[in-house]
Image: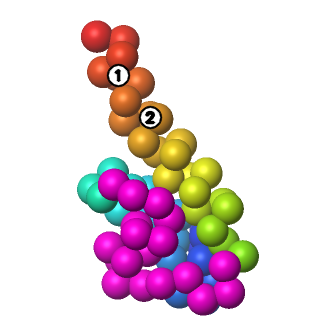
Amino acid sequence: MYTCICNAIREDDLRQAARQHCGDAESVYAKLGKRPNCGHCLEEAEELIAEEREGMAAPLAAA
């Protein structure tokens, strides 16, 4: 599924970049070599990034 239509950024690509790069949606987009155009995707992108990072931290918290 596409998260950002303007830049053709798929949810999987965004999640992978979020695991490899810290920062907000705009900085994760930059990691992908993109930048927000219309901005409609930024709220959803922020949620996906936070969700992905929380998922990474969960196993550590359980240990």
Given the current orientation, which residue lies at the most extreme top position?
63
Residue placed at 30% from the left, 21% from the top? 60
Span shown in magenta: 22-39
The amino acid on which the numbered mark 2 sits, given as a three-letter code, is: Gly
The residue to which callout 1 is attached is 59
Residue placed at 53% from the left, 87% from the top? 7
Q: Is residue 18 above or below residue 9?
A: above
Residue 39's spot in the image, x, y percent? 66, 79
Residue 3's spot in the image, x, y percent? 61, 70
Q: Is mark 2 on a helix, strand or loop?
A: helix
Q: Does the magenta stretch include residue 27?
A: yes
Q: Is residue 17 magenta?
A: no
Which of these two is toward me, 27 or 44?
Answer: 27
From the image, give the main secondary structure of the stretch colored magenta.
Answer: loop
Residue placed at 37% from the left, 35% from the top? 56
Rendered image quadrant of residue 63: top left
Quadrant holding the N terminus: bottom right
Label at residue 55: 2
Total tally of numbered discs in the picture: 2
Residue 13 visible? The answer is no
Q: What element carries label 1?
A: helix
Q: Relative to residue 59, is residue 36 drawn left or right?
A: right
Rendered image quadrant of residue 16: bottom left
Residue 22's spot in the image, x, y percent? 33, 54
Residue placed at 40% from the left, 69% from the top? 27
The amino acid on which the numbered mark 1 sits, given as a three-letter code, is: Pro
Snapshot colouring? rainbow
Given the current orientation, which residue lies at the most extreme right position?
40
The reply to whether dot 1 and dot 2 touch (C-beta < 8 Å) is no
Q: Relative to residue 34, is residue 45 drawn left or right?
A: right
What crowding class fits label 2: few (fewer than 14 Cα within 10 Å), some (14-19), or many (20 or more)? few
